[in-house]
Amino acid sequence: MDSSKLFNTNVLLIAVSALVFIIFLLLSYLFPRKRYERLHTLFIHLAFTCIPAFLIGVVDRVYLLEYFLEDTETLIKSRIVEPFGIYTGNLDKYGLKAMGPPLDFNKIFNDMEPGGTLLILDTVIPDIHKTFPSMRSAFDRGVKIKILVSHPDATITKLRAEEIGPEWDYNKSFRPAIYGYISHFQAIVAEDKKKRTELLEIRYYEDLPGMPMYILDNPGDNNDYLHHGYFLSSASVELPDVEFTRTNTGVFIAFLEYFNEKWERNKENKIDLVKFSGPGSLPTPKF
């Protein structure tokens, strides 16, 4: 709000009403009552009709407008500026960057920088083969990839399949999809086994799945990103993507620590992609 325009408009009203009053008053003297009774009376009446406008303008200028602007400024500060400042401050503090459509998984590979490490925790990423060009490019840049995948035969996997409903029937869809998911990584590693077995490692988990997360741990701290979804009553890949950047007090660190702890807890659960041969080739789950 530009208060100067309001004040200028108010001053103009006072000036115009005063000027018109003087003009009509002068005209009433130029046309004296004795010779021009009707015109004289008309100009007198017109002159005095300007007095209320002049007085209102003065009172408004001196008192009402000033307090109106003060109240308006206070209202804007309390209802808009201060809450928005707190909100945006928290965004910076906790690192929330964006919330958008479901994640395009090419992005997590394309945004990796040479020497970075991509951390993936999920049950399964459907159609992972569609990211192969982006994944190959990431491997060529020396990107390491660590993947935590739900054991296809574990109880938590069956329970997750029940949560997402009949379209992801455990026996017909969910379990085969996870085995296929692992097989896709086996296939892309086989293209350059010597190099890619050093860059890619997959471990399975049977404990609580937490949340699906994709952590881009690039060299330095200013280009690290976290994408995460939710395990709700539909497939997480169908839900909006939430993106965070790294801040010392933010969510990124908590997710990174969670992943690393879970990775260490499952260090005995490494999947040997050379020996992997589909259903039945993983150790029997403990749970």
Image (spheres, rainbow, N blue to C red):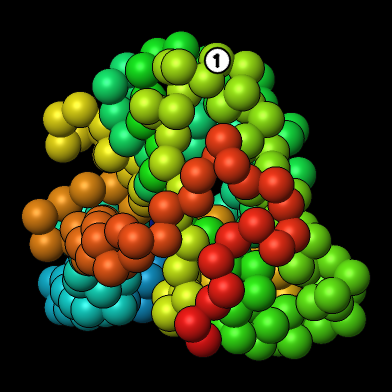
Q: Secondary structure at mark 1?
A: loop
Q: Quadrant of the N terminus?
A: bottom left
Q: Give the amino acid at mark 1.
A: Asp
- Compared to residue 283, the image places residue 194 above or below, namely above
**Residue 120 falls left or right of residue 187:** left
Q: Which residue is mark 1?
A: 192
- Compared to residue 188, the image places residue 227 above or below, namely below
Measuring from the top left, give residue 27's x and y in whole percent: 41, 51
Residues 156 and 244: in front is 156
Which residue is at the far left? 248
Q: Residue at x 77, y 68 (%)?
A: 174
Q: Residue at x 28, y 68 (%)?
A: 265
Decide: few, some or many residues near mark 1? Use Cα within 10 Å; few <14, some 14-19, many ≥20.
Answer: few
**Residue 170 falls left or right of residue 284:** right
Measuring from the top left, give residue 40's x and y in whole percent: 48, 63
Quadrant in which residue 31 is drawn? bottom left
Measuring from the top left, give residue 138's x and y in whole percent: 47, 21
Residues 101 and 218: in front is 218
Residues 248 and 97: in front is 248
Q: Residue at x 76, y 44 (%)?
A: 127
